[in-house]
Image: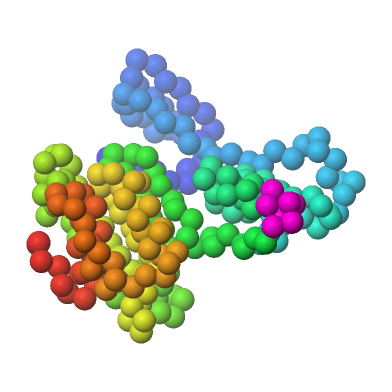
Amino acid sequence: MDIRNSNDVGGFHYFSGFGTAIGISFEAEMLLVAVGRMPYLEGLGLEKTKVVVNPRGTVKVNEFCETDEPNVYAIGDVIDTAWLAHLASKEGILVVEKIAGKKVEPIKQNLVPNCTYCDPEVASVGLTEEKAKEAGYDVKVGKFPFSASGKARILGETDGFVKIVSEKKYDEVLGVHIIGPHATELLAEACVAMTLETTADELGRVIHAHPTVSESVMEAAEGVHDLTIHM
């Protein structure tokens, strides 16, 4: 596998399974174009308002998605938060509830799940081990490979692992990172657990059905305290 990041591509020609780009020639069965997207703000008349557009082309908002123009809100791909449909949906709900006069709480950006729908799937929420250390936490990590999961072996999908990042003082789970079968589904448990500020010990003591791939979350949590059994 040849992965090339951050390359400027002036053009691409594809014919009979053979492609060329910037002097590079290669054979391929499929071409994936993932150039991203940009906020679309043209024709909205923002220049006649107090709405501020950041240098990156996104609309400046506060934690309640309010712009600098009273009663004007912005959500989704036009603001500087993760470009994720599930986050934009919650931003929209937050705005509607605030307009309706309900008490709302800012969205906790560190608890927004990130999922990549590839094979194997990749999913994560919270801090990575590196980011947790940079933030000053005394970090402990638990990791469990799907190769040791009975259900993953039944499925024939044993690549990947579950990794749990916690901090030593209070044992709070700071991040969960999964690569493997049903990773994007398994992450929901981590999102709930972290929203409730669970500890690695608490997560490891939750009984998970056997055999399931979700057991790997439990096993990884147990691993934070070197209590993993099925390895």
Q: In the drawing, does residue 180 fall left or right of residue 31?
A: left
Q: Residue at x 49, y 63 (%)?
A: 110
Q: In the drawing, does residue 10 fall left or right of residue 116?
A: right
Quarter the N terminus occupies: top left
Q: Is residue 67 magenta?
A: no
| Image location of residue 159, percent across then percent down | 19, 47
In front: 135, or 217?
217
Q: Identify the image quadrant of residue 201.
A: bottom left
| Image location of residue 185, percent across then percent down | 34, 46
In front: 154, or 122?
154
Q: Identify the image quadrant of residue 200.
A: bottom left
Image height of 11 relative to 228, above or below: above
Outermost residue, right side: 48
Quarter the C terminus occupies: bottom left
Range drawn in magenta: 96-102
Q: Residue at x 48, y 56 (%)?
A: 112
In front: 133, or 177?
177
Would you say residue 46 is visible in this rendering? yes
